Image: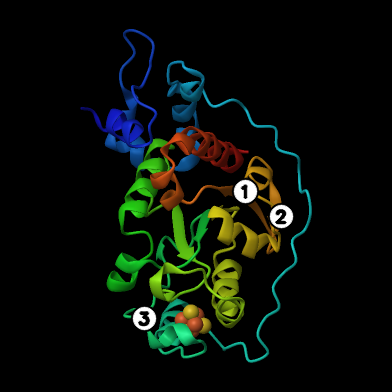
Amino acid sequence: MSRSAFVLQEMGLSPLWRPRGEPDIHDSPANLAAPIAETAAIVTVATPPSPAAMATPAPVEIPFEIKEATRPAKLPDALPIQDWDSLHAHVAACQRCELAKTRHNVVVGRGNPTARLLIIGEAPGEQEDRQGLPFVGKAGQLLENMLAAAGIHSTEDVYICNVVKCRPPGNRNPAPAEIASCASYLQWQIDTIQPDLIVALGRFAAHTLLNSQAPISTLRKQLHHAHGRPLLVTFHPAYLLRSPGEKAKAWQDWHQVKCQLAS
Ligand code: SF4
């Protein structure tokens, strides 16, 4: 099975349709690693066949800037973090909240710190806590597959992190006090990366970043503006593993991410 067919199968979108006689350009390693702007056309070529859930991602009408989300207050004792090494050192030594007592490793982030795309999830899970890296379990593999299918290179085109940097026990949602304690680290990452686009993965990250309690079905398909940057919302890959029927919607969302980056 070709790489592109595998990727789309993982997303629940295979088989890949393409015109008879047209080469499978998705299988070129150069294409998968190419800069985002140069691969925008790839997504539009990957036209899954009917039924409706496998149709070409319909252009999503994005109303501009539905509202400016409330910017979280910086902590009064915001640390004098100068660079990424300093950030990692501060987070590694951080005891600001209760999560420090149960973590095995802090999870600061991974990817390109000068990327145009910043992906923000909720919190580290068990595998992330063990390895000290975000999105390395099954959900992380699905995220990798979705990025690859969209022609986005997960190490060159993206920086990935979470709202909080330590694992909540039992994968519970982080408490408001824990989010507030960790907010200055996330804000430093956003301010330093200055991404062209933020993607919030899942309801929790979206609610935190947008200071909203609206359902994810409402928050998707709209271009928000938060933390001084454009922001799109899509499903968390862990949710997609539990609800594979939603993968077609996620494909639409990532198609929209590509369009937004190309605009
Ligand atoms: S979650 Fe954030 S604030 Fe809490 S201990 Fe970890 S790094 Fe510090």
Residue 4 shows in the view: yes
Q: Residue 106 placed where, x, y %?
A: 38, 78
Label 2, label 3: how far apart the Cα atoms are: 32 Å
Q: Position of residue 54 (x, y in %)?
A: 46, 23
Given the current orientation, which residue lies at the most extreme top position? 20
Of badges 2 and 1, nearer the viewer stands 1
Q: Residue at x 53, y 84 (%)?
A: 81
Which amino acid, by three-letter code, is at mark 1?
A: Ile
Kind of residue at badge 2: His
Where, by quadrant of the figure, is residue 17 drawn? top left
Residue type, numbered disc 3: Arg
x and y percent of residue 47 in the render?
45, 20
Residue marked by disc 1? 216
Q: Is mark 3 within 8 Å of ligand 1?
A: yes
Disc 3, SS: loop
The N terminus appears in which quarter of the rendering? top left
Indicate which disc, 1 or 3, sits on the residue closer to the N terminus.
3
Q: Position of residue 154 (x, y in %)?
A: 38, 51
Q: Is 238 above or below relative to 23?
A: below
The numbered mark at residue 103 is 3
Q: How many residues crowd around disc 3 within 10 Å: few (fewer than 14), some, or many (20 or more)? A: some
> The C terminus lies in which quarter of the figure?
top right
| Disc 1 to disc 3, C-alpha distance | 29 Å
Q: Residue at x 37, y 59 (%)?
A: 135
In this figure, which residue is indicated by the disc labeled 2? 225
Dot 1 alpha-carbon crowd within 10 angstroms: few under 14, some 14 to 19, many 20 or more: some
Judging depth in this view, the residue of 173 and 119 nearest the camera is 173
- Say if 188 sits above or below 36 in the image: below
Q: If you read the primary sequence from the N terminus, does the residue marked by circle 2 or circle 3 appear first?
A: 3
Image-based side of 153 in relation to 67, left or right: left
- Sequence-first disc among 2 and 1: 1
Discs 2, 1 touching: Cβ within 8 Å:
no
